[in-house]
Image: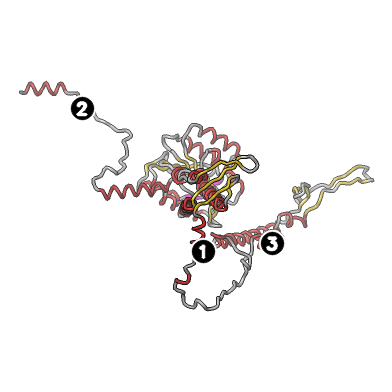
Amino acid sequence: MEAASTSLRDDCPPWEDVSLSAPHRDDGLLVTNVNQTQDLLRSQGQAAEWKSSSDWLLTHSLYSSGLSLSTLLSHGTTKISAGEDGGLSRQLEITAAALIHFDFQLYQAIELYHGRIRWLNQGSRKVFGLVKGSRVGVIVDTSDVNCTKFRLPDLQRNLLSLIEEQLSCKRQLYLMSCGTETSSLWDGPRDVNTFRLQEACGWVDELGARGGCNLLQALKRGLGLGCTQLDSLVIVLGSSPDQTSDALFDYVGQSILGRALLIHVVSYCSVSHLTIATVKRLAEVTRGRHHIFSASLGVVDSSTDVELLWTEIKAARELLGHTEALRQGRLRDMSVTVVGQQISTELDSFSLSPSLPRPPNHNAPLSIKPPGVQPSSSADWLRNHGLKAKRLGLYQVLSPNAYSLLEGFVPILNKTVSSTVHEKAMVQFEWHDGTVKNVHVDLPLIYHYQKQLMSAVAVLERRVRWLSSGSRQIWGTVCEQRV
């Protein structure tokens, strides 16, 4: 018996340890509790909201929902007959119920898109946009321009909100600051856990001004990690990079060839046209997304995700215009007959007001208190409050001390002499008509001009906030008195 057991042990292969280098992540659906499974499926539906608008529209666009003009026309019957001039004419017959149902679906889609726009304008998504990917690298501009004592506290608070709301849900994280020199919190991406998130929050609290904005160096480090370590890169810019745009775009364009790296570029509270143009161009070169946020106005100036939704809303409104044209009896070169439209018109004209209860004081005279200050359009408002009205244009300020170049013939010298400019007294400045003038710059005058400009900008920002509040945000400003 002992010999038999020994032979069996000799025939068995030796035990080998099995190591799983990349085990499949448990999706949590292998459970016995039905309620738990339903909760997980519901959470997956909520996670679908965190897709970019381009991915989200793959299942929620007008086309994917079957809301197109060709789909609407397929619900009708088209007949081709000979016209009076000998040509062929097309006649469409469609039911009023089909038009009503199509309009209802369009209004539902528009409301869905508006709801997603509102969702994108909440929390950290409003400031930085929607961050995609599971292994995310973040580059934060820590230049002197972006990290002044007035801007830094808001930047830190918004970054902490970004970590709490979005980055905490990622699998891996890598944080870099972009000053004159690039520095990172870790030497590579780290798995997201409570300890790493605490380190990230501490890193944000220690951010400070670090000179310029060496974005090229930061991109070399971020893009050098490779697709195996990062699948998404978020770039937060508040100033213009130190490098020229051509050098920056050429490097990025060559570095991402053949790589599935998601690039998300954010303009954080920048009023520089160069910075905003760099952000948009960088997103275009990398086929990524851009997000431009203005803290002074409290609104998103431009966003790839929001613009895609507005495009769908515009297309839905155009389709509503086509349905109205069908009700009018003509769509392009095709005559239309709407079956059942007369019945629906009679139902619309039928009034139920005699049978409805009337509110108290229904027969009392209508009393409307006119507003104290009548609203005006921005064009009229700018005539009194614009830069031109306040004589704050650059040429208007410089014109009292601007002198044209003089050149004339001096008989005693027997030659033509031109005026010279002393560099300590005047500078040559190109005028709006293309000529060059000698301008004397008075520093106290320039400082006073800067204060006036800041005051004018504050007035313009208050006007924008007023236009974006209440019913004006939805309907605009009604300025006329008889509406």
By secondary structure, the bulk of the magenta-drawn segment is best described as: loop
Q: Nearer the viewer, mark 2 or mark 3?
A: 3
The structure residue drawn at horizontal position 49% and vertical position 50%, both measured from the top left corner, is: 95
Q: Earlier in the sequence, mark 1 or mark 3?
A: 1
Q: Position of residue 134 (x, y in %)?
A: 40, 42
Q: Amino acid type of disc 1?
A: Ser
Q: Nearer the viewer, residue 213 or 238?
A: 238
Give the label on residue 383, or none.
3
The structure residue drawn at horizontal position 55% and vertical position 78%, both measured from the top left corner, is: 365
| SS class, disc 1 | helix
Q: Is residue 445 above or below residue 216?
A: below
Q: Nearer the viewer, residue 122 or 200?
A: 122
Q: Amino acid type of disc 2?
A: Trp
Give the label on residue 349, or none.
1
Image: magenta residue range: 207-211
Residue annotated with mark 2: 15
Q: Earlier in the sequence, mark 2 or mark 1?
A: 2
